[in-house]
Image (cartoon, rainbow, N blue to C red):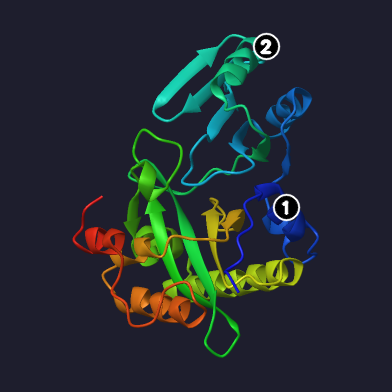
Amino acid sequence: MPIRRISSKWAKTEALLASTELRGLVPDTRPFEPDTVRDMLDEYGMIYVKPVNGTFGNGVIRLAKTIGSDDGYTLQAGEKQISFPSFDDMYDALLKLKRPRPYLSQQGIELLKQDGRRFDFRVMVQVSPTGQWETTGIIGRLAHPRKIVTNYHAGGTPLPMETLMKAHLEKAGRTSRGYRLELSRLGVDVASVLGKRFPGLKEIGIDVAVDTELKPWILEVNTLPDPYIFLRLPDRSVYRRIRKYATAYGRFRRGTRASANFRRRRAGKR
């Protein structure tokens, strides 16, 4: 049986919102409409609009109200940020910029930063050879200094969770080990909920944002996550376990060498 992939962000978000345990960890997410964009900007001050179907952060746009202004707005896509004197001017530019496909509007979470750069985490969860969901890897993603997304493919830097969270956790009197355990449990909870809604799932990659109160937020879930980013960790055993599990449920063929893509990444090439 092929590994199941769910491409719709909205379908996965709806499944998480149906869970009483998880809905409070999902940012307010709604179908893209002009009134929705305006209302959410009034409520949250900053939102992201993103394609319902898409990967690697492609097509994600950040919208924000200008602090201290009732009418000013900013729009950022990639490295380009533009200011507008009114909502209508901003929205007209947004329609020209966004792709001709369904989009979502999502409450903006102010991510923690290191050296002025935003970061979040990818939590890898897989079905183990014994048939149980297990968090097999957690890796931090430090955004490119001038971009809004943290993805490796958009110039983000993969780093160990402990490197990014150390100062924040120490300030709060918490430990890296404890926080890692919290994210690991969250990963299994998300996988369990989605696995019941979408039978056949074998692996998921959860994008988790952490706010200034150290609360984790489930930004989105990828059902065909890239395992190779974990090669960027100093501890190669993480990737070896991920690959072992993926081979067991059929993503990789047994007895074959890694793909050319894997070999390029192992050599440290982008």
Q: Say which amino acid is labelled 1.
A: Ala
| Label 1 neighbour load within 10 Å: few <14, some 14-19, many 20+ | some
- Closer to the chain start, of discs 1 and 2, is 1
Work out whether residue 68 can be spotted.
no
Q: How many marks?
A: 2
- Find disc 1 in the rendering and name its residue: 11
Work out whether residue 70 can be spotted.
yes
Q: Say which amino acid is labelled 2.
A: Asp
Q: Quadrant of residue 229?
A: bottom left
Q: In front here: 41 or 158?
A: 158
Disc 2 on helix, strand or loop? helix
The N terminus, quarter of image: bottom right
- Residue 192: percent from left, percent from top: 68, 74
Q: Is residue 108 above or below residue 70?
A: below
Q: In front here: 101 or 173?
A: 101
Cα gap from disc 1 to disc 2, whole angstroms: 30 Å
Q: Is residue 83 above or below residue 46?
A: above
Q: Quadrant of residue 37?
A: top right
Q: In front here: 213 or 80?
A: 80
- Find disc 2 in the rendering and name its residue: 88
Q: Is residue 107 above or below residue 191?
A: above
Residue at position x 28%, y 74% in the image = 257
Disc 1 on helix, strand or loop? helix
Q: Taking 213 as reference, is 36 left or right?
A: right
Residue at position x 57%, y 26% in the image = 98
